[in-house]
Amino acid sequence: MTRTALVQHIAGWLCLAGAASVLAFVAYGFIGPPGPGGLEGLWSEPWFLITMADLYLGVLLAMGFVWLRPGRTLVKAGWSFLFVVGGHPGVAIWLGVQLLTGKVQMTPESTGSLGK
């Protein structure tokens, strides 16, 4: 295994581990005690709305990247569903899978794009 392939596998596993960590915090958010404002209070918080806008802008950009790449429509739709439901952890899962399966290749020197 080359150094680049090793780094690519490590990066893939880090993406999956990061996604698992964030999803564990999300699960705690659903089962843990509510905060002082509860869910109703969140919608009145400007920073919650900013965070949601930021999240879904990132999700839409990731979906655009997936749809621009070659592949089957059903697979793209499945990944898009995961992105919408899972947010950035869903994107991290997609990237981790792409890195571990070799569908995205890292190069030893930076070329400025993932596809080269």
Image (spheres, rainbow, N blue to C red):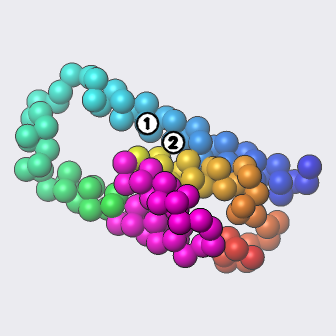
Numbered mark located on residue 107 in the image: none
Q: Main secondary structure of the magenta part?
A: helix
| Dot 2: element | helix
Expressed as whole percent of the image width and height from the top left, the position of residue 101 reads: 74, 52
Q: Is residue 83 visible?
A: no
User: Image point 41% across, 54% down: which residue?
Assistant: 81
Say above or below: 112 vs 20.
below
Instruction: Please say whether residue 76 is one of the residues in the magenta stretch.
Output: yes
Instruction: Please say whether residue 102 is one of the residues in the magenta stretch.
Output: no
Task: Identify the residue position indicated by label 2 in the image.
Answer: 19
Expressed as whole percent of the image width and height from the top left, the position of residue 18 reads: 54, 41
Expressed as whole percent of the image width and height from the top left, the position of residue 76 reads: 52, 62
Amino acid type, residue under disc 1 in the picture: Leu
Amino acid type, residue under disc 2 in the picture: Ala
User: Image point 36% across, 30% down: which residue?
Assistant: 27
Which range of residues does the magenta coloring cover? 57-85
Expressed as whole percent of the image width and height from the top left, the position of residue 21 reads: 49, 35
User: Image point 63% across, 43% down: which residue?
Assistant: 14
Q: Are marks 2 and 1 in contact (CB under 8 Å)?
A: yes
Cα distance between the residues tagged 2 and 1 = 6 Å
Q: Is residue 26 left or right of residue 92?
A: left
Check the image and name the residue furthest to the right. 1
Say above or below: 89 vs 37.
below
Nearer to the camera, 102 or 52? 102
Numbered mark located on residue 23 in the image: 1
